[in-house]
Each structure stands twice: as C-alpha cells, then as structure tokens.
Image: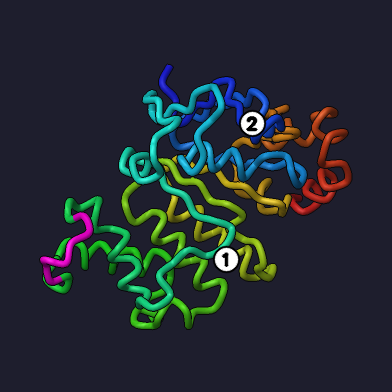
Amino acid sequence: MTYALELKDLRKNFGKTEIIRGANLAVNAGERIGIIGPNGAGKSTLFNLISGRLAPTSGEVRLNGQRIDGQQPYEINRLGLSRSFQISNIFPKLSVFENLRCGVLWSLGYGYTFLRFLSKLDDANARAETLLRQVGLERKRDVLGINLTYAEQRALEIGVTIAGGANVILLDEPTAGMSKTETLHFIALIKEVTVGKTLLTVEHDMGVVFGLADKIAVVVYGEVIAFDTPAAVRANARVQEAYLGSSVADAQGAGK
C-alpha cells in the first residue's frame, strides 16, 4: 500500500544523543493527523526530518511512496509537501497579495525570475486572488505583511503554505499565541483550506488537536507510542501515563 506520508524506523542523533528513536508512522491520503507530546519529545525534529531541514541518521521518509529522506527542502516541496513554522515566515515588506503570488509562481512553471512583469501573469494573479478569499484577507490585499496582526500573519502563512498546490501540509503550532476566538476561527480556516489534502499538525492545545484531527500520533522520547483516533488515544493508559494526564479529561469535556 502506498501512503501519502510514511516514516520507517526513522532515527536522528545529535552527537551521541539520540533524539528520534525509531519513529514509525503511516498516513493515508486526506487524513488529518495531530502530533502531540511533551516538550523535548522530538516533534519539531520530526517535522524537520520530514521537510528536509535535517537529514536522518538512519531510516526512511516516503512521500507518496517515494523516498525523500536526505533531499533538500526545495526538492521535497516540489514533490508536493509544504510546511509552516512556529514563527510566522512571510515576506514582511511585500503586500499580502504579493506574498501569495510569490507562493504560486513555481507551481505554475515560472520559477523565480525578474524577466517577466508579474502583473501580466494572469494565471498567477488569479490564483493569488483565490487564495486571498480562501484565507479571508481580501480587505488586507495591499497591506504589507509586517503591518498585519499576529493572527492575520498566521493566516497569510497558511495561504503561502498551500499556494504551491502541495497535497501534504505540515503546520507547526498554527494557533500558538492566539486568543480563544482567534483559535476557533483558525481551526475553521485550516479545515476549509486543507480539504482533500493530507495534514499533519503539531499542537499543544488539546482542544485544537481533538477538534481538528482524524487521528493523533503521540510522540514521547523520540518514539511514536500511539497512533489512533482521538477517542482511542483518550482511552490509552500508556498515553495518559506518559503525557496527557488530566489534559485528556479536559479535552473530553471541551469536546462535549
């Protein structure tokens, strides 16, 4: 069977310290996966290995059946995987529209070139306009990225992340620092813009995780100790002992 994303006995050492200790994960196309675990569990390292920011010590990462471990981030992106970061990663001196247009150029075959007038690229401009509407930033079209609110910058980054048409999306703590109202809006936005895509998200907010994910992967000490539906993870005694504890009950209550 070919999975959208598959990790096979993935390991990462920094010197003599083993951070990722034989992680295994198989994600079907179109699934929404929440990745949780205590601080220092290796969640960000796992994302860095998947997206090519780090090369594994051993093991495999497969995207739609093709090995991508050890490839450069831009190569992996062109194969259909895109990610966002904990800290907003946009072009602060470009407008919202220009940020989104930059995101679509490569997928439309233009690459990065100064030999064309961008205003005349009708397909790129149309795609950027569509993304503006999808992320709810039409009224901020000509505002510089640096002048957006924090929540708006995060929405813009989501737009840039999906702009290239990737079918596997990695979001690293997308709602961190948001108010409850902003978080609820952002969950709805993520659901809307990732329809039909495979989603992996790292989150510390259990309400967000249990409300967004089809399945949850629990990472502890560099291993995936559980991978199942939210209901099964809530009931998993090993997960409760290793990490969730009272947070499970809190999340259950929030979901009722």
Q: Residues within 10 Å of mark 1 (few under 14, many from 20)?
A: few
Instruction: Please name which of the two marks, 1 or 2, marks the residue nearer to the observer.
Output: 2
**Residue located beneath label 2 in the image:** 13
Tell me the SS state at disc 2: strand
Q: In the image, 63: left or right of 249?
A: left
Query: Mark 1 or mark 2, which has the lower sequence index?
Result: 2
Q: Position of residue 46 (x, y in %)?
A: 59, 38
User: Against 229, is 60 above or below?
Assistant: above
- How many numbered marks are there? 2
Magenta stretch, residue numbers: 111-117
The N terminus is located in which quarter?
top left
Residue nearest the observer in this picture, 219 or 194:
219
Give me the residue at 57% from left, 52% from top.
172
Q: Residues within 10 Å of mark 2 (few under 14, many from 20)?
A: few
Q: In the image, 232: left or right of 73?
A: right
Does the magenta run of residues contain 112? yes
